[in-house]
Image: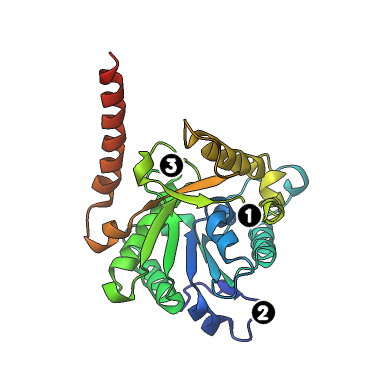
Amino acid sequence: MFINKSAEIFAPNQADPLSALSKTTDLCIGAHHDDIEIMAYGPISKCYGNPNQHFTGVVVTDGDGSPRTGVYANYTAEDMKEIRAIEQKQAAHIGRYHAQVMLAHKSSDVKNPNNTAIVNELKELILACSPEVLYTHNLADKHDTHVAVCLQVIRALREIPQDKRPKRIESMEVWRGLDWLCDEDKVVHDTSAFPNISAAILGVFDSQISGGKRYDLATQGRRLANATFFASHAVDAYEGICFGLDITELINNNADPSDFIVGYIDKFKNEVERRVAAMS
């Protein structure tokens, strides 16, 4: 199934990790180690301790290019790949993921739109998992590799017969939030449950935090801000929220991805224009 020799499936409680993928109900495909924990804690917490829900994470890239400062200043690129894989396994263990897959691709390969090998690999992986819901990055993200992963996932899904696709596909927020979406287009994921687990699965990525990026604090801050600013005339219903955008129809109707996301941007623009015009 896998292209790279260093790719692996981490499923410590499964005798046969590959066959265990078939029990997946919620599948998240992210670009980098810790992207899953940032964008998909709602689904992770939904599955946590639930015997009928099983979360599987997929990291597409290999961790090369990570910043190296502080205690990691003298680490080689290979050292960083290893430490990031270890951190991802720790997060999966703490979060009780059903499985954690690491595909170990170079970012440059993922960003190549003609890389059909990655598309085929993702297609086989999605079919092996057969999830009810699939989560990935959003097309308005400002990180090139995140957008590239989203597009590769879209290509893979479109090669899967419609009756074998996940029932719902959502794109999530990481390097750009989705609070700008019109409220009726936001898929709300409650991130309030198990705050200790939420903090722990973010906190294990010490190579990033010590490297000068407080993703742990920033992610928790965004979730709190989403919850507080979601409804202007009501008390907070959640202690934390992450937003998603349902892109199922984008997959099924073969629409152009750029046109699809620009349509939501235009809708937001029109909402702002109407509000300002009504009070001018």
Residue type at tag 3: Leu
Residue drawn at x 49%, y 56% is 31
Disc 3/disc 1 C-alpha distance (Å): 21 Å
Q: Which residue is more in the foreground, 25 or 59?
A: 25
Instruction: Give the number of the mark in front: 3 or 1.
Output: 1
Residue type at tag 1: Ala
Say how many tags the image has.
3
Ranked by sequence position, the earlier of labels 3 and 1 is: 3
Q: Name the residue under label 2.
A: 13
Ranked by sequence position, the earlier of labels 2 and 1 is: 2
Secondary structure at numbered mark 2: loop
Residue 70's image quarter? top right
Could you tell me residue 182's position as x and y percent?
35, 38
Q: Mark 3 points at which residue?
A: 178
Q: Mark 1 points at which residue?
A: 193
Could you tell me residue 88's position as x and y percent?
64, 61
- The answer to whether residue 102 shows anywhere in this view is no
Secondary structure at numbered mark 3: loop
Neighbor class of circle 2 (other Cα within 10 Å; few <14, some 14-19, many 20+) is few
Rendered position, 193 above or below 21? above
